[in-house]
Image (spheres, helix red, strand yellow):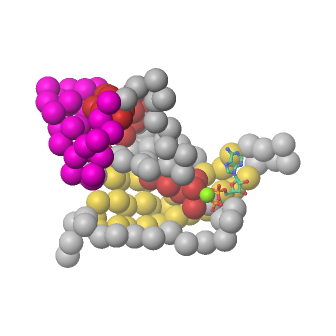
Amino acid sequence: MPQNIIELDGVKLTLPSAAGPVNILRGIDLAIGAGEAAGLVGPSGSGKSTLLMVLAGLERPSSGRIRSAGQDLTGLGEDALARFRRDHIGIVFQSFHLIPTMTALENVAIPLEFAGRGDAFARAEEELRLVGLGHRLT
Ligand SMILES: Nc1ncnc2c1ncn2[C@@H]1O[C@H](COP(=O)(O)OP(=O)(O)O)[C@@H](O)[C@H]1O
Ligand SMILES: [Mg+2]
């Protein structure tokens, strides 16, 4: 059996709103295997973005258990969640959230520096060249 990279067990998320509490996620059980590509499909407002936030450790569920990349996210504090995201999560948002005052090279290298990689700038340059952005480094 392939190893699961993501496992959700009875994940619920309720958030307050002006109209009262909204039960956005109501007991999600989910397993995604390592190397598997998964798509999430559903009507607008059904909770897709919220589920991704929870999977990425950007939002903490009200109850239930999440294992991701071999780590149990249940009960992790803000700092531990930030480290988890730094080490394991990559997200391409619809709006990219690039830092406009920094070059393309700096935007790619900074998270690697935060992760303690001594070769952050060399690696960032290599990856940018790999995706055809070698002419946009600076
Ligand atoms: N921060 C929030 N506070 C209260 N309700 C929210 C919040 N974020 C999302 N919702 C509600 O949760 C539901 C699911 O939203 P969302 O995850 O954005 O759905 P989708 O991405 O599938 O369109 C919607 O009814 C939305 O209004
Ligand atoms: Mg959405």
- Residue 68 appears anywhere in the view: yes
Label the magenta part by its dominant secondary structure: helix
Quarter of the image holding residue 36? bottom left
Q: Position of residue 131 (x, y in %)?
A: 27, 53
Q: Is residue 10 above or below residue 62?
A: below
Q: Which one is nearer the viewer's eye here, 137 or 123?
A: 137
Judged from this view, the residue extending furthest toward the front is 135
Task: Residue at 22%, 46% (x, y): give it.
Answer: 129
**Quadrant, the C terminus:** top left
The N terminus lies in quadrant: bottom left
* 70 or 113, nearer to the observer: 113
Stretch in magenta: 112-138
Say above or below: 21 vs 112.
Answer: below
Task: In the displayed orientation, state which residue is furthest to the bottom.
Answer: 1
Q: Quadrant of ligand 2?
A: bottom right
Image coordinates for residue 38, horizontal then vertical, percent: 40, 70
Q: Residue at x 42, y 49 (%)?
A: 91
User: Is 21 on the left or on the right of 117, as rendered?
Assistant: right
70 to the left or right of 18: left
* Drawn side of residue 71 relative to residue 28, left or right: left
* Residue 42 horizontal/vertical position (percent): 61, 72
Q: Residue at x 66, y 57 (%)?
A: 24
**Residue 128 position (above or below residue 32):** above
- Residue at x-position 41% and y-position 53%: 66
Q: Is residue 32 left or right of residue 13?
A: left
Q: Is residue 113 magenta?
A: yes
Pinpoint residue 25: horizontal percent, then vertical percent: 61, 59
Question: Vertically, is 127 above or below 112?
Answer: below
Check if residue 22 falls in the magenta segment: no
Whether residue 54 can be seen here = no
64 or 67, which lies in front? 67
